[in-house]
Image (cartoon, grey):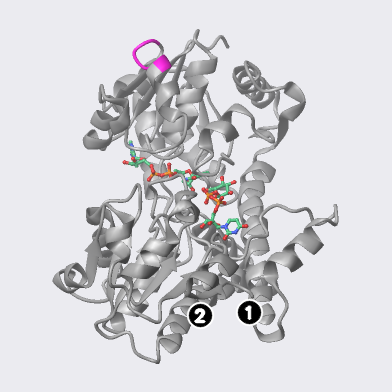
Amino acid sequence: MKITKICCIGAGYVGGPTMAVIAQKCPHIQVTVVDLNAERIAAWNDEDLNNIPIYEPGLDAIVGEARGRNLFFSTEVEKAIDEAQIIFISVNTPTKTYGKGKGMAADLKYIELCARQIAKIAKDDKIVVEKSTLPVRTAEAIKSILDNTGNGVQFQILSNPEFLAEGTAVQDLLNPDRILIGGDTTAEGQEAIQTLVDVYANWVPVDKILTTNVWSSELSKLTANAFLAQRISSINAMSELCEKTGADVNEVARAIGMDSRIGPKFLKASVGFGGSCFQKDILNLVYIAKSYGLNEVADYWEQVIIMNDHQKRRFSSNIVQTLYNTVSDKKITFLGWAFKKDTNDTRESAAIYVADDLINENAKIAVYDPKVSRKKILADLDYLESRKAENNANAILSFEDPYEACKEAHAIAVLTEWDEFAQYDWQRIYDSMQKPAFVFDGRNVLEGAVLEKIGFIYQGIGS
Ligand code: NAD
Ligand code: UGA
């Protein structure tokens, strides 16, 4: 099949950047990204590239190059489906908040809606690509919907999970460790796989394009996220032991990371991992394992989440305990709210849970984050439904200037590893704070010894 038109349903953190890179690298293919959210589409079409809805280093330039040439953002979902030969489904797959599997299983209602819409519109053969992260065997459900409600056209379903990390999405897309494509073992399935391989081969070396059966591909995505998150929970577990024993978790991480079998990446102890996917995907994995009666498998992976929740809670309790067991009416400054640096995404950020705990103790939280708005911070807290929205609004002070945020504070907590935090004039910050002045570095990004010399009481994670 000669590909001239691609459509992607879902213009979010995955759909937007992924399609922008495909469009940049394949100028001969017209790429249309559609979404029901008209506000989001309008933002993608904003003339001022500073206003595109997702902040990712380098993304504005790529969108600027391709948009209007062969990259389009639109709310006309049906038209885009009708015209495309390949349709990527890149909608959200959050944890279910109701019914069977509540709090564990992936909510597939948006996926099913996409499948039904494709079935209704398609008048010629299509390749449907699962880009969203899905439970293993979802392709079976999609196929059943497409084959039974369609117009007799042939559908091939491929699994092509996305491995990009936020904050480095553009680099990850331009230079991926691998592209994974799973498809049917039939001749038609293999042909569909090859069609998608040819799209990626426009910029990815073919030896990095891995093809498998559909189920392996679906399950590899959940497995990759589970392994990555497990490394963080493992080093975080060690961080608590380091604090009790005089070992330093940074030194331990370095020592074990030099073993080539372990490797140095993803061993940074922290206040806990956040982001929209690690927790959601592991809960989903646990649910799937349980649904097959594999209780030991389920318990094994659930421990990664239990450890992560513990790490967040431990951080907030330590702040309260260190500040003489009360933070009531004390100003505590959060440097960072995003779940990691170089993104404006706050989904499941540790900052939300730490703030929630401290507000329960009547603290006033002053937040400075270079990319996150007050509106977003309050929406994140309101979503927890711990208290009335007006009480959250009263408890949160937000600042556009970090020095103002830190003025008169009893303590500073670093929640995100933004590079700029290490560059601040810490003497100036110290002079403006209440004494003793505490710093709780949830990311180990500040020079503890330098801060202590200034007069701060400094506590990192795991030392
Ligand atoms: P997102 O919430 O940012 O974007 C999803 C978009 O889909 C939203 O804009 C929503 O309006 C739209 N949408 C939902 N139903 C629709 C429908 N029926 N028709 C048209 N549009 C619809 O989500 P995301 O972060 O881009 O994640 C998407 C998927 O990719 C998830 O399964 C996630 O697990 C996976 N994933 C995410 C990342 C990441 O870094 N965020 C990385 C790899 C994989
Ligand atoms: C993660 C994976 O890295 C991607 O491969 C995957 O595609 C994506 O999830 C997804 O499926 O959504 P992301 O969540 O964007 O990407 O960012 P990560 O760099 O993985 O960081 C996740 C969280 O772990 C952040 O809160 C980060 O600060 C924390 N982290 C990361 C640590 O605490 N320590 C580390 O060593 C690494």
The quadrant the N terminus occupies is top right
Q: What kind of residue is marked 2? A: Arg
Instruction: Give the dominant element type of the magenta stretch: helix, strand or loop.
Output: loop
Q: Would you say residue 158 is visible in this rendering?
A: no
Rendered residue at 32%/24% (across/down) = 73
**Where is residue 85 shown, x and y percent of the image?**
48, 17
Residues drawn in magenta: 65-69
Nearer to us in this view, 322 or 436: 436
Nearer to us in this view, 275 or 447: 447
* Image side of residue 189 versus residue 426, left or right: right
Q: Give ligand 1's quarter of the image.
A: top left
**Cα–Cα span, label 2 and label 1:** 9 Å
Nearer to us in this view, 34 or 139: 34
Secondary element type, mark 1: helix
Pointer 2 or 1: first along the chain: 1
Query: Going by the picture, which residue comes out furthest to the bottom?
Result: 325
Q: What kind of residue is marked 1? A: Glu
Q: Which class describes the residues within 10 Å of circle 2: few (<14), some (14-19), or many (20+)?
A: some
**Where is residue 370 shown, x and y percent of the image?**
35, 49
Residue 68 magenta-drawn?
yes
Secondary element type, mark 2: helix
Instruction: Tell me the residue that label 2 is attached to.
Output: 314
Residue 445 magenta-drawn?
no
Instruction: Tell me the residue that label 1 is attached to.
Output: 240
Query: Going by the picture, which residue comes out furthest to the left?
Result: 390
Asked whether mark 1 lies closer than 8 Å to ligand 2, one says no
Dot 2 and dot 1 residues touching (CB under 8 Å): yes
Q: Quadrant of residue 445?
A: bottom right
Q: Quadrant of residue 59?
A: top left
**Where is residue 421 shown, x and y percent of the image?**
45, 55
Q: Quadrant of residue 36?
A: top left
